[in-house]
Amino acid sequence: MGEIAEPTNCGLYFKVVKLAPSDRSLSALPGLWDTQSWDTATIHCNQAILVIERNIDVPSEPTLAQMERAMAAVKRKEMSIRGAAKAFGVSRSSLHRRVTGQVPMNAKPRPEPILTDGEVQRVLKAVDARTKRGLCFTRSELSMFIRQVVEESPYTREISATFPSVSWTNNFIQCNKSHFSRRQAQSLEVCRAKASTVENVDIHFNNLMRSLKAVRRSLPLESGI
């Protein structure tokens, strides 16, 4: 509830809910609704606490049709971008991005991405290259690499000292999930134990002996004969 007048000992307050259009008792509080778009209202008092219930129409988001008409007016050179935005009730920056082809007509409002498309591809290319060589990124390594890409970029932008956060990195992985597969790292001792079976040792020994015999046959005798 918000304060609407000089408070009495008990206080004078209002809250936003629903109203009755024929109620004339609103005139009891001159000046309160002079700057408000009251559609319908009711008032009742209870122990010096005044409660006003009202219903205000909230402007809706510009429709696709509004944006199309604004774009048509600009492209026909009937209006400037600023004039068309004002005339058709759309955002000037949103109209500018659509007129210049930066975003498609039906693009939905969203925050500007921190990484450019090229930077995203650079990160994904590094992920794929390291994966092929068995040197997969950990989550923290991926975060550090993403920050490095942003810092080395020629594009100027503001990023926080904590960028990228855990949630940002998780969202990046989710948006590019075809490039990522989570695996639990194995202990080196476990890997050694699995590799050091009798069968594997015999295979490596036999391979080594064949290689040594081939080298011995290709070398001349020490006597020179």
Image (cartoon, rainbow, N blue to C red):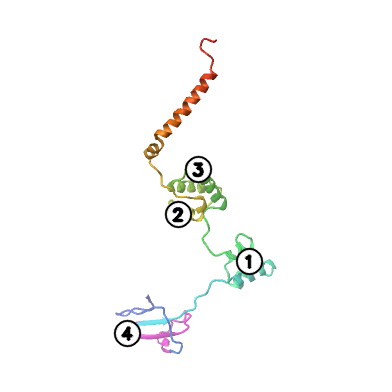
Q: What is the distance, in whole Å, between disc 4 and disc 1 at their CAs?
A: 53 Å
* Mark 1 vs 3, N-terminal side: 1
Membership of 178 in magenta stretch? no
Circle 3 residue? 130
Q: Residue furthest right?
A: 76
Q: Is mark 2 on a helix, strand or loop?
A: helix
Q: In the displayed structure, would residue 70 be above or below residue 117? A: below
Give percent across and percent down for residue 195: 41, 36
Indicate the amino acid at tag 4.
Asn
- Observer-side mark, 2 or 4, equals 2
Q: In the displayed structure, would residue 182 be above or below residue 18? A: above
Circle 1 residue? 81
* Mark 3 vs 2, N-terminal side: 3
Indicate the amino acid at tag 3.
Arg
Give percent across and percent down for residue 6: 36, 78
Q: Is mark 1 on a helix, strand or loop?
A: helix
Q: In percent of the image, x 45 and y 48: which residue is there?
A: 143
- Observer-side mark, 1 or 3, equals 3
* Mark 4 vs 1, N-terminal side: 4
Q: In percent of the image, x 52 and y 62: which residue is there?
A: 110
Label 2 crowding class (10 Å Cα cut-off): few <14, some 14-19, many 20+? some
Q: Write the start and end of the magenta stretch as one range.
A: 24-49
* Mark 2 vs 1, N-terminal side: 1
Give percent across and percent down for residue 152: 52, 45
Circle 2 residue? 170
Indicate the amino acid at tag 1.
Ile
Q: What is the distance, in whole Å, between disc 2 and disc 4 at their CAs?
A: 52 Å
Nearer to the camera, 48 or 69:
69
* Mark 3 vs 4, N-terminal side: 4
Circle 4 residue? 46
- Observer-side mark, 3 or 4, equals 3
